[in-house]
Amino acid sequence: MIELTLPGRNLVLELHHLMLDLNGTLTVDGQLIPGVKERIKNLKDKLDVHLLTADTLGRGAEAAAELGTKLNRVDADRGNQDKKEYLLKLGKENTVAVGNGYNDVHMLEEAVLGIAVIGKEGCSVEAVRRADIVVNDINDALDLLLRPKRLIATLRA
């Protein structure tokens, strides 16, 4: 668990789950971005990690095995809704969501903390609009969770 209080907002975040989009967020052209595997390994001591993907490039199972996580497939036509439903089952008040695509919009908006990643494959404008934080690289997003005081500096009132 990661717990932090956001000054000036009377908000305490108690994070238990990390929902991650795969393509364009953790990978570029289906390949894990360097540094992701090590960061996910360190985060698994603090958070339950959930990997969600429509698996456009067919490398989801391989990426999940490399990360030591379970793969959760979403429907290519209703991935946005599938991800939202998955989030609601986990508990949106204890979940941080990280993604880059249009099919990540609902999870980014509904999660207690949504982080949009621009990355090399770009980022949906709607994902940026609905996220609490926007970063340029997945490793920056994961480092926010590994060093939560960075979150306080960004999200305080």
Image: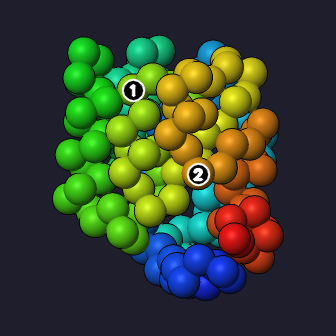
Q: Quadrant for residue 155, please give it.
A: bottom right
Q: Is residue 148 left or right of residue 123?
A: right
Residue beneath disc 2: 132
Q: Is residue 89 above or below residue 108?
A: below
Q: For the residue labelled by badge 2, is the local secondary structure a helix, a strand or a loop? A: loop
At 27% from the left edge and 62% from the top edge, which residue is drawn?
90
Mark 2 → mark 1, Cα distance in angstroms = 17 Å
Is residue 4 in sight in this rendering? Answer: no
Q: Is residue 71 above or below residue 56?
A: below
From the top left corner, tell me how far across and down residue 157 is, in percent.
Answer: 69, 71
Q: Is residue 118 above or below residue 16?
A: above
Q: For the residue labelled by badge 1, is the local secondary structure a helix, a strand or a loop? A: helix
Q: Amino acid at mark 2?
A: Asp
Q: Is residue 41 above or below residue 135?
A: below
- Label 1 crowd bin: few (<14), some (14–19), many (20+), radius 10 Å: many
From the top left corner, tell me how far across and down residue 101 is, in percent.
Answer: 50, 25
